[in-house]
Amino acid sequence: MSAETETITEAKPEETTEPKKSRRWLLFSAIALAIVLLLVWYLWSQTSSLDGLKRFVRYSGKHYESFSVRAPDAGACAVAGDRLCTASQEGISIYQADGKLLAQVDTPWSDPTLKTSGGRLLCYEIGGYRLSVYDTSGKEVFSLRTDGRIYDAEIAEHGAVSVLTEGEGCRAVLETYSKSGDLLFRHESKSRYLNACALSPDADFAAACAIGQEDIRFASAALLFETDRTDAPTELSLDAQMIYDMAFLDDESVCAVGESSLQFFTADGKLLREYAAQTGSLSAYRFADGLIAAAYDLYAGGSALVLLDAQGKELSYLELDDAVLHLSLCGDYLSVLTERELLIYDRSAHLCGRTENAGWKSALARSDGTAFCLTGHSAALYIPG
């Protein structure tokens, strides 16, 4: 009997798919981590969403006590680069958040006005002849002595300055200086008085408010200039109201603050919007970073706060039981001081901090949502919880 021949075939092991799956998961995890890190970076550095966490990290475990300042109640105070700056008859002083005196300039100012922008500090006296610009280390960048008394002055984001003075042989003179103090532009108003001026962040445009008569009635008008040209200005009627102040909220948008309304228009004279409160009268306002905050005393009692963008669009509105003593706007934050309390809001009117008024006369918002609170000769840093 013949034997059957057996054929043995060696079985090949099946290929496992585990390594390929692991590589895919590692790639997916790396992409997800990169997206999360990018989102955290954006929220941390480009928005105010994580400012509460930033304040916790920055100020946790630290105690900030009240510190003495040089006579802010007899002079002026402002925040530049989140540092507290004061001007008085004792000179210019610049302080850190913990009260450390960083710089002191002993040049006295009898009745100073202090304005800040882009880390620069502008100091002048209304009715005086002297104007100086400092950086936040206290170094004088440049100084001017004007021919006529100063009516108004503004400092732009990059350090350029516009100054409005009385004229010799004319009604008023508007001048613009570069960040190093070189004269860029000059306009003499022959027939009308000018009472307020503004300068765009890039110093390409300047504006002034002209006051006079139109058909035997009082009238105000905005005069709009290109600072690299000598052409006649573009003119825009601002109606029969006194204009208190004006400012560029961005490179081409201007806001004029009047006794009856806020008017928003472009540098080429196009009216964008007019905002008029129907239930109250304007009591305070502040310009900063493309925004204007305005407080109104309501006829029925209490007050209203409104935040508007560069085109005059209302971003937020809220009402308070008390009148506003002091208003400050910095970056995304608005500080509101009443007789009873200090309130810190973001630009969407979300309440970020609240504390009792400890006898403060003013409260200056900082870009991280904290605020310098000032009494007669002292200041303290308030940090929202």
Image (cartoon, rainbow, N blue to C red):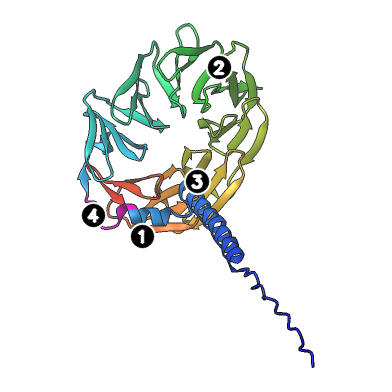
Q: Are marks 4 and 1 in contact (CB under 8 Å)?
A: no
Q: Are marks 3 and 1 in contact (CB under 8 Å)?
A: no
Mark-to-mark CA distance, 2 and 3: 32 Å
Which residue lies under the disc numbered 1? 385
Crowding at dot 2, Cα within 10 Å, few <14 / some 14-19 / many 20+, comes out as many
Task: Report whether residue 340 is seen.
Answer: no
Q: Specify the segment rendered in magenta.
A: 58-65
Q: Of the two numbered discs 2 and 4 on the same chain, state the one appearing first in sequence.
A: 4
Task: Say which amino acid is labelled 2.
Answer: Thr
Residue 353 x %, y %: 39, 57
Residue in the foreground of this view, choosing between 129 and 247? 247
- Which tag is nearer the camera, tag 3 or tag 1? 3
Residue 123 x %, y %: 35, 26
Does residue 108 appear left or right of residue 340 in this picture?
A: left
Q: Of the two numbered discs 3 and 1 on the same chain, state the one appearing first in sequence.
A: 3
Which residue lies under the disc numbered 2? 227
Q: Main secondary structure of the magenta part?
A: loop
Mark-to-mark CA distance, 2 and 1: 46 Å
Crowding at dot 1, Cα within 10 Å, few <14 / some 14-19 / many 20+, comes out as few
Crowding at dot 3, Cα within 10 Å, few <14 / some 14-19 / many 20+, comes out as few
- Which tag is nearer the camera, tag 2 or tag 4? 4
Which residue lies under the disc numbered 3? 46
Q: Are marks 2 and 3 in contact (CB under 8 Å)?
A: no
- Image quarter for residue 308? top right
Task: Say which amino acid is labelled 4.
Answer: His
Mark-to-mark CA distance, 2 and 4: 48 Å
